[in-house]
Image: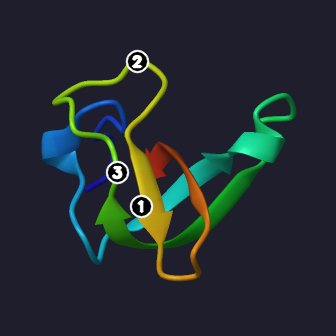
Amino acid sequence: MEGLSGTERKNIRAGLSVGIVLKKDQRSGTLTYGIVKDILTKAPVHTHGIKVRLETGDVGRVKIIQ
């Protein structure tokens, strides 16, 4: 799945391992890694990344699909 864009909803599904930026980390760009539980963005594309909820409960925008 390397090289897929986190800005397109079609590339993301539950169970994928991703790196997200949490709201509190937007300035620093610090990534939080985990497994996608829910996709929260309804639009097919979002310029800042598709918003997801990880299995840990963290919510953020996908920057890396592992």
Residue at (55% x, 56% y) in the render = 19
In this rendering, the answer to whether 37 lies above or below 20 is below
Label whose residue precedes the other's in the sequence (3 or 1): 3
In this rendering, the answer to whether 56 lies above or below 9 is below
- Which amino acid does the dot numbered 3 rest on? Leu
How far apart, in angstroms, are the residues tagged by discs 3 and 1? 19 Å
Q: Position of residue 27 (x, y in %)?
A: 84, 28
Q: Position of residue 29 (x, y in %)?
A: 76, 36
**Residue extending furthest toward the right:** 28
Label whose residue precedes the other's in the sequence (3 or 2): 3
- Which amino acid does the dot numbered 2 rest on? Thr
Disc assigned to residue 40: 3
Residue indicated by mark 1: 66
Q: Position of residue 28 (x, y in %)?
A: 86, 34
Q: Position of residue 65 (x, y in %)?
A: 39, 53
In this rendering, the answer to whether 36 lies above or below 23 is below
Q: Which of the image's four quarters has the N terminus?
A: bottom left
- Count residues near mark 3 (Cα–Cα under 10 Å), then give few for <14, some for 14-19, many for 20+: some
Residue indicated by mark 2: 47
Q: Which of the image's four quarters has the C terminus?
A: bottom left
Residue at (34% x, 30% y) in the render = 7
Residue at (57% x, 51% y) in the render = 20
How far apart, in angstroms, are the residues tagged by discs 3 and 2? 15 Å
